[in-house]
Amino acid sequence: MATDQKPITGDWYANTDGKFIRIWGLVYQQDQLSRVVIQRLSGKRYHIRLANWLKLDLVRYPLPEEKRNAL
């Protein structure tokens, strides 16, 4: 199942392997979302194309608002 959610900066997602990624940022070209900057728990960041983001099998990881703001 592919991700059909728009990536939101600061939100956490878990993949089918149980690994977590965070949306660190979004890259726009000509006023359109083109890339997603993801961050793993290790701190490493990666740029992926929006088309590849939409192919990922992710589940949004719900965190309470106060914990999200602390990250």
Image: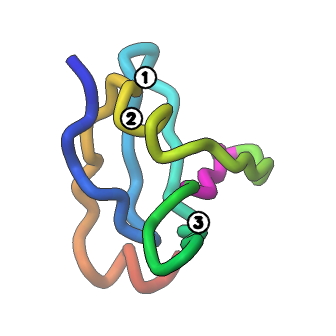
Amino acid at pointer 1:
Gly
At horizontal 47% and vertical 46% (from top left) the residue drawn is 50
Image position of 54 with respect to 63: above or below: above
Residue 19 placement, left or right of 58: right
Question: In the picture, residue 32 is in which quadrant?
Answer: bottom left
Q: Residues within 10 Å of mark 2 (few under 14, many from 20)?
A: some
Q: Is residue 19 above or below residue 21?
A: above
**Dot 1 or dot 3, earlier in sequence:** 1
Residue identifier under label 3: 24
- Which secondary structure lies at badge 3? strand
Question: Does 5 sit above or below residue 8?
Answer: above
Give me the residue at 26% from left, 25% from top: 2
- Whole-percent x, y for residue 3 in the image: 26, 35
Q: Nearer the viewer, residue 23 or 33?
A: 33
Q: Which mark is residue 18?
A: 1
What range is drawn magenta here? Answer: 36-41
Dot 3: few (<14), some (14–19), or many (≥20) neighbours within 10 Å? some
Left of 66 or right of it: where is 23? Answer: right
Distance in Å between CA atoms under marks 1 and 3: 19 Å
